[in-house]
Image (cartoon, grey):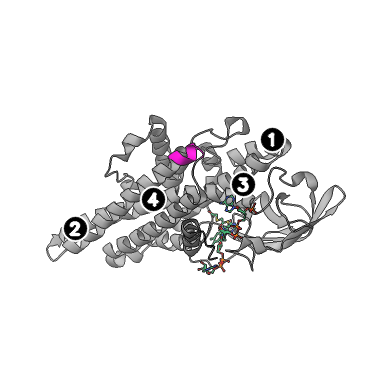
Amino acid sequence: MSENFTSPDFYNIDELLSEEHKLIRESTRQWVSKSVSPIIEEYAQKAEFPSHLIKELGEIGAFGPYIPEKYGGAGLDQISYGIMMQEIERGDSGIRSTASVQSSLVMYPIWKFGSDEQKEKYLPKLATGEIMGCFGLTEPDHGSNPSGMISNFKSDGDDVILNGAKMWISNSPFADIAVVWAKDENKRIHGLIVERGMDGFTTPETHNKWSLRASSTGELIFDNVRVPKKNILPGKSGLGAPLMCLDSARYGISWGAIGVAMDCYNTALKYSLERVQFGKPIAAKQLQQKKLAEMLTEITKAQLLSWKLGKLKNEDKATSAQISLAKRNNVDMAMNIAREARQVLGGMGITGDFSIMRHMMNLESVITYEGTHDIHLLILGNEITGHNAF
Ligand code: TGC
Ligand code: FAD
């Protein structure tokens, strides 16, 4: 609920933030409160992406916050990026998805692995939202195991001919470009920038979702698509390239999940203080206090985790396993809080008059995409033991 946009900050974590971080938080929060919260339930109910928000997301700097200013980004640090994702996801995970796909899965690979020509051509327009991108890694038969992908391309003069299919692709139905991962004739994975309008390239929408309903999800189908070789990202090949993009997006999600948890906690706290049963506000009952105390505890732990991870990212020291730990922990934490918060609201909790049920359903996607809960556990298991158990 937009009027509840206060931050639980039980450990004075604000002291760890700079004035710039706090300003960014305030301005993003105000935008979410004004532009997202009042309309998002309606869009989720009708399963429609609020496309009019794209331009505004560009204006608040949510596309490529850490991309250098010379490419149209905001040149901010990683904690600023995290804070923006936190505040946007407080509104809705699907809107945060749009921002994090554009930033970490489209702008980031072009910035990190692209040619100067690609950076100049695409990044400034992606930063404003004039063009939108999507990221195609997952295939119908290769989700957790992207290295098995079968999408492939063959050289043909100055072009390559791309074949294959990707599914579960956020923003694909309206994206202008897709950063697509496919294998060359030597089975080496490369990133290619595929543009809408190229012959043989289609992006059918995926319907009937109960989760991320205000986000547009679809497929990418490549039927002998002729892609100029100059659209191949030259800077890095192999699975490590898309996994680096995922590290950036998973880090953002670790913050985003805190935003969801904060919204659920605030809603449950307010409701429990107002709802009277057995002659007292339910907030006066021990069982409700237990729920609220545990929510605050878990939010506080997650805040410290993501803040420290942000410091490590700023120093370029964060490892993939550290990022997996934070994504896994914080999304799970948010799911547990959403479930408990919904119960605090009793029957009202299942209605669209409150944000909790929408958050709960959204989190089913968030705990699945960018590596499932169990895949992140296995990444940690591998890190701890040296034994790959995938
Ligand atoms: P593995 O053999 O471990 O690694 C292959 C190569 O990659 C290197 N590497 C990394 N490099 C950079 N960053 C990382 N995080 C890396 N992790 C591994 C590794 O060193 C190796 O390099 P080289 O030179 O030796 O070849 O790979 P594997 O095939 O065993 O798979 C590992 C596994 C399971 C962890 C990985 O495939 C994985 O993370 N699977 C989950 C798939 C996933 O997360 N998909 C996400 C799709 S995108 C999405 O969901 C967007 S949702 C967007 C939204 O709406 O917000
Ligand atoms: P599977 O890999 O088939 O996994 C099924 C189950 O098996 C899971 O519980 C998993 O944890 C488990 N499992 C898998 N391997 C193992 C193992 N070795 N040991 C034990 N258990 C295992 N992808 C993109 O490329 N781009 C996007 O923009 C994008 N957006 C998405 C948006 C939404 C709304 C959703 C739902 C997904 C999106 N994805 C996207 C895809 C997402 O990344 C995949 O769904 C995810 O990686 C899991 O793959 P899968 O669905 O094929 O499940």
Q: Give the Cα separation between the discs numbered 4 and 1.
A: 34 Å
Q: Is 119 left or right of 84, judged from the image as shown?
A: right
Residue 67 quadrant: top right
Give the prevailing secondary structure in the magenta stretch: helix
Residue 9 quadrant: top left
Picture disc at residue 283:
2
Q: Earlier in the sequence, mark 3 or mark 4?
A: 3
Label 3 Cα neighbours within 10 Å, binned few <14 / some 14-19 / many ≥20: many
Q: Nearer the viewer, mark 2 or mark 1?
A: 1
Image point (53%, 37%), residue name: 66
Quadrant location, the C terminus: bottom right
Which residue is labeled 4 in the image? 258
**Mark 2: amino acid:** Ala
Q: Earlier in the sequence, mark 2 or mark 1?
A: 1
Q: Give the Cα separation between the discs numbered 3 and 4.
A: 24 Å
Q: Earlier in the sequence, mark 4 or mark 1?
A: 1
Q: Is 66 left or right of 71, judged from the image as shown?
A: left
The answer to whether the residues at label 3 and label 2 have Cβ atoms under 8 Å apart is no
Picture disc at residue 120:
1
**Mark 4: amino acid:** Ile
Image point (48%, 66%), residue name: 210
Q: 59 and 144: which one is in front?
A: 144
Which residue is labeled 3 in the image? 106
Q: Which residues lie in the magenta part?
A: 311-316
**Mark 1: amino acid:** Glu
